[in-house]
Image: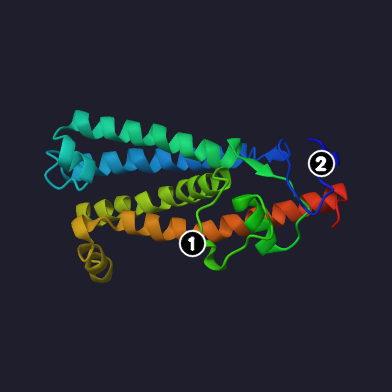
Amino acid sequence: MNIDFLQKNGRIYKGDCMKTNNKQGFILATLSYLTVTILDLYFTYIGTPNLELEGNPLYNILFYSWTGLITINVITFLFYIAIAYFGFVAYKRPVTNETDLKRYLSYISFGDPDKYSTMMWKLPKIWSPQIACLCWSVATILPFARFLIVIVWFLLILDIDAPLFFSITTAIPMGRIDLVVAVLGAWLLSFVWIHKEFKLNLKNIEKRGIKN
């Protein structure tokens, strides 16, 4: 990293970035998703060995066998590894001396701290932070979202009465409460990611003594 480039009005110049490198977070997220995937398949086998009750939309459209279902899960797990790796490890966060959240967000999105717009409705000029935000948010929420499906199977197999829970799941198309939670959760976590990255940038400023 060349700190000499970080002196003009909080600008980020080419090459001024720092790898995220949160390997522990990546490993924890990956192992969590792998665990819930195995549990989901196991309870699916116990609850519907002939797959008549399987609600995976890809399975219902493209495949009609255990081989197909397992194939889908392997593909989605590999995809999960890819997005988790980028969100937790590979993303190179920009280094800047901006200490205002709006200016920081504007710069990592547009390359100019003065181009902030309310609700950030404009398409970004720099896509890597947006992709990293999406990858981190989705990778973080997916293990929890999929665990809800495990809970559904657990309740069904043991015939446990949970009227409120099932009234919510049945109100959702195909009972895919995991998809709803994943979408809403990822959206909420995107704000967490923004504040997390901003605070890390402030710590980096403190550490290196970079001031406006």
In the image, residue 16 above or below residue 186:
above
Local crowd size for mark 1, using a 10 Å CA cut-off: few (<14), some (14–19), many (≥20): few
Q: Quadrant of residue 93?
A: top right
Percent x, y of residue 140:
49, 49
Q: Tell me which amino acid carries mark 1.
A: Leu
Secondary structure category for the residue under label 1: helix
Instruction: Using residue 50 as the reference point, say whether residue 102 is left or right of it.
Output: right
How many numbered discs sit on the rendered protein? 2
Identify which residue is drawn at 26% across, 71% down.
Answer: 164
Where residue 167 sits, quadrant-wise, is bottom left
Q: Please name the residue shown 27% across and 52% down the image.
A: 154
- Which residue is more in the foreground, 108 or 181? 108
Q: Nearer the viewer, mark 2 or mark 1?
A: 2
Where's residue 165, x and y in %? 28, 66
The answer to whether the residues at label 2 and label 1 have Cβ atoms under 8 Å apart is no
Q: Which mark is residue 5?
A: 2
Element on which disc 2 rests: helix
Instruction: For marks 2 and 1, give the CA distance.
Output: 34 Å
**What is the quadrant of the N terminus in the image?**
top right
Q: Position of residue 192 (x, y in %)?
A: 57, 59
Q: How is the image coloured?
A: rainbow
Instruction: Check disc 1 and report the residue beneath it.
Output: 188
Q: Is residue 12 left or right of residue 210?
A: left
At x 39% / y 54%, what residue is drawn? 182
Give the percent coordinates (x, y) of residue 184.
40, 61
Q: Quadrant of residue 132?
A: top right
- Residue drawn 21% across and 52% down? 157
Which sits in the foreground, 151 or 51? Answer: 51
Please rate how many residues cluster around mark 2, counting C-alpha atoms within 10 Å: few if below 14, some from 14 to 19, many from 20: some
Amino acid type, mark 2: Phe
User: Which image quadrant: the C terminus?
Assistant: bottom right
Residue farthest toward the bottom in the current orientation of the protein: 164
